[in-house]
Image (cartoon, helix red, strand yellow):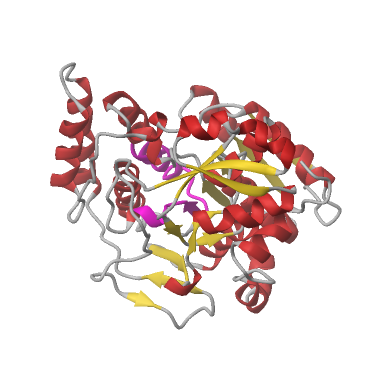
Amino acid sequence: MPLHFNIEQFIREHITRRPQSLFLPDMEDHAAKLHTEIKDKNVLVIGGAGTIGSSFIRALVQYLPGKLIVVDINENGLTELVRDCRSRPELQLPDDFKTYPVNFSDKAFRKIFEHEGPFDIVANFAAHKHVRSEKDIFSIEAMVENNVTRAKDLLDLLTQYPPKHFFCVSTDKAANPVNVMGASKKLMEEVILAYSGKMKITTARFANVAFSNGSLLAGFIERILKQQPLSCPSDVKRFFVSPDESGQICLCACILGQSGEIFFPKLDTSSMVNFADVVPSFLAEMGFKIKRCTSEEAAKNAIDMIRDGYYPVYFFPSSTSGEKLYEEFYTDEEELDTATFQSLGIVKNAKRRRIADLDKIIETLKQVFEDTKAEKKDIVSALNSMIPGFEHIETGINLDQKM
């Protein structure tokens, strides 16, 4: 990887095409409230080692919290979080700062919660976020368990020690979902909003985070380091935010939002980026030109061309299950507030179900998973009956079958 490659600058110039954060004006306008609500407060961040969770932490610590506890099952990710934050000259972690490599459904988590709490701010970023995590009934069970069941268990715990601010991240894929991941996050929204009368709860749907962990773009860096060919869909467009922007929108929603609100970025379709359009600029930064290939095999066989300054890339039309060619942040039925903030919109009338009804839904899903003969189509059918507008796109192909 060339030493001159600056990933944050590359994102600004070639992906978001914004010289500064989209959310900077709103953060400046509301700086006083952000300071008041965060300074010297006790904060718990769950899933804080991921791209969005760690970006939230970087945004948060600028307002000087008194205590910060970070929980994540990714031990290596927590290590990198600490190294990254302590290596940035503009950041100062609080003196009372601890990381714990535990699952937020473990008994150890409850002990940590009771020992380190009570907390003024709790933010949950633990989630299955990839469409590739729905290839069969087993992977879907793990996804629903993490995105829905554990989220509800966490809320049941929080009702005993309610924080002033609780935030749980959602996704743009929850609006008119076409994949199980999006449907699970839509159900998660309904779960957390069912508790919005018991404590202040907010969430946010937003775009793809450029170069986030496990993303296609982050994979480009790994492929270059290993001198392996690239593959990229030729027809998929996405909204993008930078890692810093992902943390900022979550912080704004968490602190500035009213209970039951869903935040989203004000982005129009002109800001969407085709993945394939990023490849030439990225390879140019690496010192290569594109060698277009017609198959995965051809791309792998052409890897020797990197010695001549050409990098093999296989472009293909998207054909995997649950894949939209575009994304959206809200539905036609949702009431929007686009006046309160300059760069942030808010869904005001998000559906709220009774907690008892959600208990029944979760129990129904558990019964499907407990059926040893159940298949993916059975859980999709169950979700169809629970989530109006859910139309799963099934092609019989999943991302694990592609390079």
Is residue 20 depicted above or below 298 in this figure? below
Q: Position of residue 289 (x, y in %)?
A: 66, 50
**Residue 185 or residue 179, whichever sits in front:** 179
Query: Bounds of the magenta span?
Result: 147-173
Is residue 256 depicted above or below 321 in this figure? below
Is residue 133 depicted above or below 56 in this figure? above
Tell me which residue sits at (35%, 27%) in the image. Answer: 139
Is residue 269 depicted above or below 372 in this figure? below
Residue 348 falls in which quadrant of the image?
Answer: bottom left
Furthest-bottom residue in view? 339
Residue 176 falls in which quadrant of the image?
Answer: bottom left
Whether residue 66 is visible, yes or no, is no
- In the picture, measured across the screen, residue 114 lies left or right of residue 192, that is right
Q: Position of residue 89 (x, y in %)?
A: 86, 53
Residue 246 falls in which quadrant of the image?
Answer: bottom right
Tell me which residue sits at (51%, 28%) in the image. Answer: 103
Q: Is residue 108 magenta?
A: no
Q: Is residue 163 magenta?
A: yes
Q: Position of residue 65 (x, y in %)?
A: 71, 54
Tell me which residue sits at (47%, 33%) in the image. Answer: 296
- In the picture, measured across the screen, residue 269 lies left or right of residue 125, that is left
Could you tell me how many numbered marks the image carries? 0
Tell me which residue sits at (76%, 43%) in the image. Answer: 84
Picture quarter with the N terminus: top right
